[in-house]
Image (cartoon, rainbow, N blue to C red):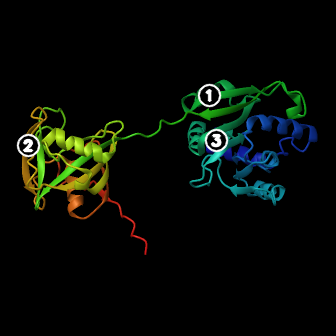
Amino acid sequence: MTRTDWDATADSFDRAPDHGLLDPAVRASWAARMRTWLPADGRPAEVLDLGCGTGSLSLLAVEQGHRVTGVDRSPRMVDLARIKLAGKPAEILVGDAHRPPVGERRFDVVMARHVLWLLPDAGAALRHWCSLLKPGGRLLLIEGVWGGEGIPAADLLKALTPLTSHVRHEPLSADATLWGRPVDDERYGLVAFPARRPRHTEVVDVHLILRRGDEVLLSRRSGTGYADGLLHAPSGHVEDGEDVRAALIREAAEEIGVVLSPDDLRVALVMQHRGPRGNPRTGWFFAAECGPDLAPYNREPGKCSGLGWYPLHALPADMVAYCRAGLDAYRAGERFVIHWHEDGDAIVHDAQGVRRAVHLPATDPPA
C-alpha cells in the first residue's frame, strides 16, 4: 500500500462508524476481552492507544482503572475522543501512529486496533512501538484480513518473532458478539511481550597515577597481545568481590611491588571508555605519591618490558590513547570523562587525531 493509498484509506475511516462499539452488547464483549488483555495487577497501567479514533477502546481502558494517551491523525476524531473522555485520566493527541508524538514517555501497554495494516512500514512501526514500552510492557494488536486487505496472523506473528519473547494469539472471528454479527474472515488479537534487553554490564578497571614530583610512572606493555610496545600506567581489572580501592592496591603490589594503603590513595578521575571495536568499560584513576619508602620495580616481566618516570607536563607520544586521555584530563583538573573510540581509531595516542575525550562537568558543592 502506498502512502497515498494509506491517506485515502485513513480518510475513509474518518467517516466510519464507531467500530460497532455503540451497541451495548458489542461494547460489553470488548470490555470483557480488554480485561484479559490489559495488566490486572491492581495498579493503573499507562496505555498508549494508537489510531484511537473516537476513543472507544481508550474509554474501556479508562473505565477499567488505567490511564490512557490516545493518538490519532484525524483532528476530527481527536475532537470526538476528547469529548468522550473529558474529565477522565486521558490525553488525546493529534499525530501519526507510526511515530506518535509522546517524546521520552514510556508505557505499560501500546495498543492498536485495525491500524498496523494501514501503515507504510509495519515492521518499522513495531520496532518503534516496542521502544515505547517500559520494562515488562506489552503490545496489544487487534488485526485481521477483510476482503483480501489486512495482515494475516501468521505474517504478524513472524514479524514479531525477533522482537518478542512470547506472543498470545487469540482468534476472534468466531466470537460474533465482538462484531455484532457472525463473520467468516480472519480477525484476531495478539498480546506480545518484547524480549528483555540484556542488562548493560561493563568491565571496571583501575589505574595508578604514581607521582614523583612532576613525574609519573609508566610501564611499557609487552607480550600481552594488546597495545604491546606502548606505555601505560600500572593498571588492572576489578575482580569479583573487590571494591576499586582494594583492586588498585592489589594491582600495584602485583605489577610494581608497591604496597599502598587506602589512605595513600586519592581519586583522580573516573572515565568511561570504549576502545576501537571494543566494549565499553569504566576506569577509576587513583593518584598516590611515591615516597622514599616506595621502590617500584617490574614484577611482571612477561607483561612489561620496563618501567620509567616521565614528566607529567610532557608525556611521550607512544602511549595507549586511553591512558593518555586520563592523564591529560588529570592534569587539566577534570574529574569525569568519556573517552569513546570510533572503530577505525588507533590504540596509540594520536596527537593530530580527532579529540575523543569529553569532559563532564561536576556539580558545585551546596552553599
Q: Position of residue 184 (x, y in %)?
A: 83, 24
* Mark before the other along the chain sequence, 3 or 1: 3
The total of numbered circles placed on residues is 3
Give the label, 3 or 2, closer to the camera: 2
Q: Please identify the quadrant where the N terminus is shown.
A: top right
Nearest the viewer among 296 and 272 is: 296
Residue in the foreground of this view, choosing between 268 and 336: 268
Amino acid beneath label 1: His
Q: Would residue 95 appear left or right of 14 to someone viewing this image?
A: left
Who is closer to the viewer here, 194 or 236?
Answer: 236
Amino acid type, label 2: Tyr
Residue 65 in view (yes/no): yes
Q: Please tell me whether mark 1 sits on a helix, a strand or a loop.
A: strand
The location of residue 330, given as percent across then percent down, is 23, 59
Label 3 close to label 2 by CB (< 8 Å): no
Q: Quadrant of residue 360?
A: bottom left
Looking at the image, is mark 2 or mark 1 earlier in the sequence? 1
Residue 166 is labelled as: 1
The first of marks 3 and 2 along the sequence is 3
Return the x and y of residue 338 as percentages of the image width and height.
32, 53
Q: Residues within 10 Å of mark 3 (few under 14, many from 20)?
A: many
* Cα distance in 3D space between marks 3 and 2: 68 Å
In percent of width and height, residue 244 lies at 31, 46
Q: Residue 291 bears which disc, if any?
A: none
Q: Is residue 254 left or right of residue 107?
A: left
Q: Which mark is residue 119?
A: 3
Look at 62% across and 55% down and name the residue there.
101
Q: Amino acid at mark 3?
A: Leu
- For residue 249, side relative to residue 362 (left or right): left
**Residue at position x 44%, y 40% in the image:** 200
